[in-house]
Amino acid sequence: MRRSIPLAVLLLACGGKATPDPEGGEPSDREDMDVDVDTDTDTDTDTDADTDTDTDADTDTDTDTDTDTDTDTDTGAAIRDLDGDGYTISDGDCDDEDPAVHPGVTDLCNGQDDDCDGSIDEDASVGMMLLTIENPTGLVLSLDTSTGTPTVISELGDGVDNSMTVVDGTRTIAHSHGTRSLQELDVCTGERTVMADHGSGNSCGLVWASDGDLYGLDNEGDQLLRFDLESGAAEVIGGIDRGVGNCGMAYDCVTDTLWGADAGTRELFSIDAVTGLTLETVRTDVPFGAVGLAYDPANGMFLAVTGSELFSIHPSTGESAAIGRVEGHEHLSSLTFHPTCD
Ligand SMILES: [Ca+2]
Ligand SMILES: [Ca+2]
Ligand SMILES: [Ca+2]
Ligand SMILES: [Ca+2]
């Protein structure tokens, strides 16, 4: 920098006029008409011909050599990392407006392809165990989803739990037919905390839905219940327009749908969470006695346990397939996916 701005300004203010370089070479800043100190004719302070302040020759404000405003070196449009998750669309971010969606995340059960690999919710039951409780022994069993083979996880004591679900991936809640109350379980250690009487009938099914509510199906009042997760109190949402005997509940997290299964009619039925009314009914050939029901987001099938046998059920046709016997155990009436124990 050979001259100061005040001097250049002074020259112009005094009527200074640009004169050709007597040597015939590059013009000096004395010769351009702007107020900066460089030798070009624009108004910025660098030496290139554009109007921005960086040192490259393009017209954007970044330091690469292309003409778009992102930080890569090609000129393609819309490849910026708009959501700031570290992945551009060209890196494989299939939703560049949602930072929770990009390659490498766990694909949770929410109906969308979180990890952009083309499959939806495929991780939702990965690393989970399929859990049931035997009555009346109170044994907590994990079942192999391919064979039904049981592994004893813990023992809860008196076997009065007839439905069970996992809240938010962390809290295991069961309903006790004996005490008409919810119980918070640590199935890995066998510890349980009994909540107060919930004030309603027997809840033969229990599911936690991703709207944050814990739902139960009362087969004495034939009604849909919502439980307070802290107090365990039941609130009646509405009468369900069918009789319900032994039942189970499952939550389809892909379509956000509550499902019930009734042993008496051998039917699966979806339930309107707002009114409690039945939406869709699917007949199945599973020989239900007691009922445990779960939805497997990995393949979109229901899993059902009754007595001592594990089945899969197609959600549209109700067609079932026997997976295997739960050897040595009977009276299984609950089923849920649960994180594995350490
Ligand atoms: Ca992104
Ligand atoms: Ca994203
Ligand atoms: Ca996926
Ligand atoms: Ca997902």
Image (cartoon, rainbow, N blue to C red):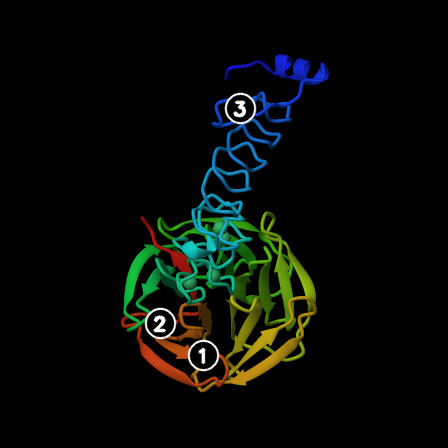
Three-letter code for the amino acid on which mark 1 is drawn: Gly
Disc 3 to disc 2, how far (Cα)? 102 Å
> Disc 3 marks which residue?
21
Q: Residues within 10 Å of mark 2 (few under 14, many from 20)?
A: some
The kind of residue on which mark 2 rests is: Glu
Q: Closer to the N terminus: mark 2 or mark 1?
A: 1
Q: Is residue 15 left or right of residue 80?
A: right
> Circle 2 sits in a helix, a strand or a loop, which is it?
loop
Q: Quadrant of residue 150?
A: bottom left
User: Which labelled disc corresponds to residue 289?
Assistant: 1
Mark 1 neighbour class, 10 Å CA radius: few under 14, some 14 to 19, many 20 or more:
many
Horizontal side of 90 relative to 28 (left or right) equals left
Q: Position of residue 219 (x, y in %)?
A: 59, 72
- Where disc 3 sits, the SS reads loop
Q: Which residue is mark 2?
A: 330
Q: Nearer the viewer, residue 271 or 210?
A: 210
**In this rendering, position of residue 104 left or right of residue 235:** left
CA distance for labels 1 and 3: 102 Å
The answer to whether residue 137 is visible is: no
Q: Position of residue 265 (x, y in %)?
A: 54, 85
